[in-house]
Image (spheres, rainbow, N blue to C red):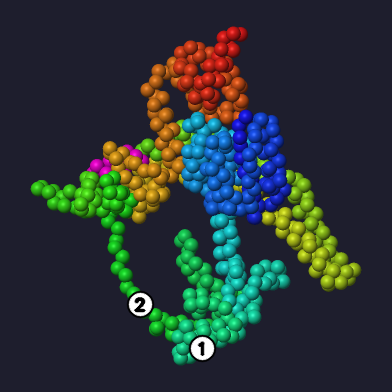
Amino acid sequence: MKNVILYVRVSTDEQAGRGYSLRDQEQKLINYCQTNNLNILEIFREDYSAKTFKRPEFKKLLDYCKKNKKEVHQLIFIKWDRFSRNTGESYQMISVFNELAIEVNAIEQPLDLSIPEQGLMLAVYLSIPQVENHRRSLNIISGMRRAFKEGRYVGSAPKGYENGKDSAKKPLLIPGKSAKLVQEAFELMSTGLYNQIEVMKKLNKKGLSTTKTPFSNLLKNPIYYGGVPIKAYKDEKACIANGIHEPLISKALFDQVQDILNNRRKKHHTNHKKLNDTYPLKGFLLCPKCNNALTGSTSKGRSKYYSYYHCVSPCNSRYLLEDVNLWIGDYLKTISMEAPVKKIFEDKIKEALYNERDKKQLGAKHYEKVINIEAKLQRLQDIYIDGDIDKTEYQIAKTRYENILSELKDKESEAINEKEVFELYKNATEKIKNIGNQYIQSNIEDKRRIIGSIFPNNFQFENKKVRTADMNPYLIKIASINGASRGKKKRDKSKKIDLSHTVMDNLSLSAEERFEKFCIKYPTLLQKVPQKQIASYIGVTPEFFSKMKSKLLKR
């Protein structure tokens, strides 16, 4: 009997009762263990976000596994997004558990990670939650920027203001208890008789709780004269919109204070070095001997100039520029997503997205509730106009219905738009498809962005090949599958098996069903192809394959 640890997690921003509640997850895992004869050692319950592994309970879980690694065989959870919503960190943490000889798996999205092709499904399962988080983040940014442009400040209220709401229940800044102290701060600074520290200390004594840096930022914040600062974003430049909140000071007073601050500020001029187009890998490439970053330079030979990436004394390692460009070009070819792999990857993404959509799709009852609440609001307004209820009763009922309607609308906004997410994946895979040509044709800044996205940390060359312990996990998987794909081309055609059909399309079948399906489809290959090879293709152990084959022969 195998010993297992159960991990259940729900973040504070996820609604209980949607299949994410701790109790629901725990019961499903316990039922799974009872059905599969697994012994539960410990259950770790987490109420924390999965953006990183810096979670209190997960740290306890990891410590427990390290102390009891001989006893623990498996770590299981409901789905991969319960494990993590950060793809890069997920691969690193899986490696940690692999070193402890502990299998990591999800009962609703089970994978056999000994099969290389199932690594693609792992990439899909891990990346979809991360893409969802990113999409949600972009939607929030878009909504906040739209509110800022309309003059409505959203976010935590700055000193002197409090977060309130207008008649339409939308966010609105209103003057707070410290508003007069903020006004006094600008008035004192405008005299030119005091510096920032002196003004801050005066107001600290009167009850304005602040320190040096926040107070300096306060004096530069246009929110106090009625402006709403909007930061630069993508192609949009930074600007200040006209706010709809009540200003605490005049624009003239604000400008006067800025002039005083600017005249007192010391100006530092820094000359930034321009990037050299000749050496795009400078800063990324490490010396294999001393592990220091290589620099680049050109020296004159007898008949022409030679460019090198080289280390400083006393190491003196160096690589000819032409050789480095050739090696990095060869490496980029290995991680370029080939057409068959790209097709399988996109098909699996579609399948996973459709499955997620079906689970989170809102039914007819949801929309009936929305229509019903909207109708009730309309009737309530009519009753109030007719004078059947007073204003207080109307406001209480109206607030209650609006809150219910708001919750229903929030559920709609959280539903997955699989087409939008799939387009993000498709665009990304299209870029990976010809990443070598993109690198060659890009300018120096884009070349460095491409290299930086591939290698989170720096890398080295060893035996004319890229060597790094820390690389984007997607690209490692693509390189391994590309290598397997190329290797198959050299084999005898009579022994060739289509992995995309034999393995990728049968992940949901049991081991016995996969074996039987293989025997029906490829009866002649049972004697021609080595057992280990077939076992690997259909995702079973050689021992299991040999056992099933013996049973078949006895028939």
Q: Quadrant of the C terminus?
A: top right
Q: Quadrant of the N terminus?
A: top right
Q: Which residue is mark 1?
A: 188
Q: In the displayed structure, would residue 145 be above or below residue 466?
A: below
Q: Secondary structure under badge 2?
A: loop
Instruction: Please give the name of the residue rendered at 54% of the width and 30% of the height, measured from the top-left corner.
Output: 504
Camera-side residue: 307 or 532?
A: 532
Q: Amino acid at mark 2?
A: Lys
Task: Specify whether 74 is left or right of 380.
Answer: left
Q: Position of residue 398 (x, y in %)?
A: 79, 65
Residue 293 counted in the magenta span: no
Q: Position of residue 244 (x, y in %)?
A: 62, 75
Q: In which quarter of the view is residue 7 placed?
A: top right
Residue 458 visible in image: yes
Instruction: Please give the name of the residue rendered at 52% of the width and 84% of the height, measured from the top-left corner.
Output: 201
> Which badge, 1 or 2, comes first in the chain's sequence?
1
Q: Position of residue 476 (x, y in %)?
A: 42, 39
Residue range highlighted in magenta: 322-332
Alpha-carbon distance for marks 1 and 2?
24 Å
Q: In the displayed structure, would residue 335 be above or below residue 236?
A: above
Residue 362 visible in image: no
Q: Position of residue 4 (x, y in %)?
A: 61, 37
Magenta stretch: helix, strand or loop mostly = helix
Q: Amino acid at mark 1?
A: Leu
Q: Secondary structure under badge 1?
A: helix
Q: Which residue is mark 2?
A: 267
User: Farthest residue toward the left?
Assistant: 302
Instruction: Please give the name of the residue rendered at 45% of the width and 37% of the height, measured from the top-left corner.
Output: 477
Residue 217: image tag: none
Camera-side residue: 110 or 377?
A: 110
User: Farthest residue toward the top?
Assistant: 554
Residue 329 counted in the magenta span: yes
